Amino acid sequence: MKKFFTTLQNIWKIKELRERIMFTLALIFVYRIGAYIVLPGVMPEALEAATQGSGDASSLLGLINVFTGGAFNNAAIMALGVMPYITASIIVQLLGFAVPYFQRLQQKEGESGRKKITQITRLLTLAITLVQGGGYLKYIQSLGAVDPNIPQSIFWISNIIILATGTIFAMWLGEKITDRGVGNGISLLITIGIIASLPGAFAFEIETMLGDGGGGPILLVAEMAILFVVMMATVLIVQGVRKIPIQFAKRMVGRGAADMPAAGSRDYIPLKVNAAGVMPIIFAQALMFLPSTVAQFAGAGGPGSFLSSLNDFTSLPYNIIYFFLVVIFTYIYTALIVNPQQYAEYLKRQNAFVPGIKPGKPTADFIDSVTTRITLPGSVFLGIISIFPAIAAAFGVNVAFAMFFGGTSLLILVGVVLDTLQQIESYLLMRRYDGLVKSGKIQGRSTSRLQQIGSGM
């Protein structure tokens, strides 16, 4: 504990780091204020009555509400949060795999290409926000939470503009946090939204467990222990890499010699066990929401039907299909972002090779086979994590708190926290202070030059 407080003191001593942390906290505070400013023309009392009990995080609307920190159910100016930006980023990323123009921007045009992609993502974010804003206002209107005394044309036009402005402002806040703060700004805003619902869910769980008919303090402690184990396992799988050793054939002379390794020196290619990250769960979750949408439009899916079971995240059919979708999408997304041929070409240019493997196609085939093998445990783990909230809910954990036992929420929390700690630790070590961990270091801040190519794919 003494070392922890010493580390906090060291963090405060570094002026640049202190200013970055304070800047980040200030912008997060501004973002959270926007989650409570209600749109003009919306009646808060009627909205609260209409959404009472509808914040089930197992539904699509409940999931959006979790990611926006409650702004969605509050009909706030930040109701859509940065979700349109996330959607636009995913679309642009997928286009980069399929459309040659976007491939050139991402891989060959360097900084200018990245700027163009950023501009395209922003424009697409605005277009998505205008569409989603209209749907959101229709949803608010269906709840009967709109003041009937306000002309509908004014209500729609003004609030669509406000919602679009709120999303663009949230996107701007995220970019400023990335540039002048600590951590990835967009991810931090989503994480703060998720964490905002944690205290209330945790307090309700304690009240339930210690109340009449609850499991008592022993079961509560056991529940916390299981949550801790799940989080540690998630950290291990997120940080896990398979290191493929490589060897350099010779040393460059002349300019740049200091940056090149000596002949016979070794390095490694870091292949992540979970290279796909949270994307497979997001894609699978999006597909699992389709049956309920189809049922609503078709008028099918009554109680006890197969479609209704697919709308219940605790049902057996839902979890079986969901698990296999996550596994399949993990393989697909890993195949898209990990390019063995690019690794092989990079090694060839650097006069490096994998010991025992011929350069060129044999190297690409070897890397591809290793990636395929390590993706299996990663995909199975993601599948288990994705259905773990349902398992927790089946054992009596309330739904709001069960969402922190796995799924998208847990992976985002772990990934963002590790990334932020990694940046803070780098500031400490640059100034010769002890890092945030007692021994070793947070994975990802590696000195390996091949980490750059590994993280870029």
Image: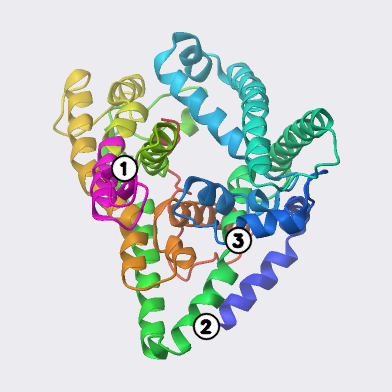
Task: Work out whether residue 428 can be spotted.
Answer: yes
Query: Which residues make up the magenta segment?
Result: 301-329
Q: Which mark is residue 52?
A: 3
Rendered-image quadrant of the C terminus: top left
Identity of the amino acid at label 1?
A: Leu
As helix, strand or loop, the secondary structure at mark 2 comes to: helix
Identity of the amino acid at label 3?
A: Gln
Residue 9 magenta: no
Q: Nearer the viewer, residue 136 or 13?
A: 136
Identity of the amino acid at label 2?
A: Glu
> Label 1 neighbourhood size at 10 Å, few (<14), some (14-19), many (20+)?
many
> Label 2 neighbourhood size at 10 Å, few (<14), some (14-19), many (20+)?
few
Main secondary-structure element of the magenta-colored stretch = helix
Please name the residue shown 73% across and 42% down the image.
Answer: 173
* Residue on which the image places disc 1: 307
Where is residue 109? Give x, y as percent: 55, 14
Residue 302 magenta: yes
Q: Count how many numbered circles sit on residues in the image.
A: 3
Q: Nearer the viewer, mark 3 or mark 2?
A: 3
Side of 355 relative to 416 (left or right): left
* Residue on which the image places disc 2: 207
> Please, which residue is most extreme toward the left here?
356
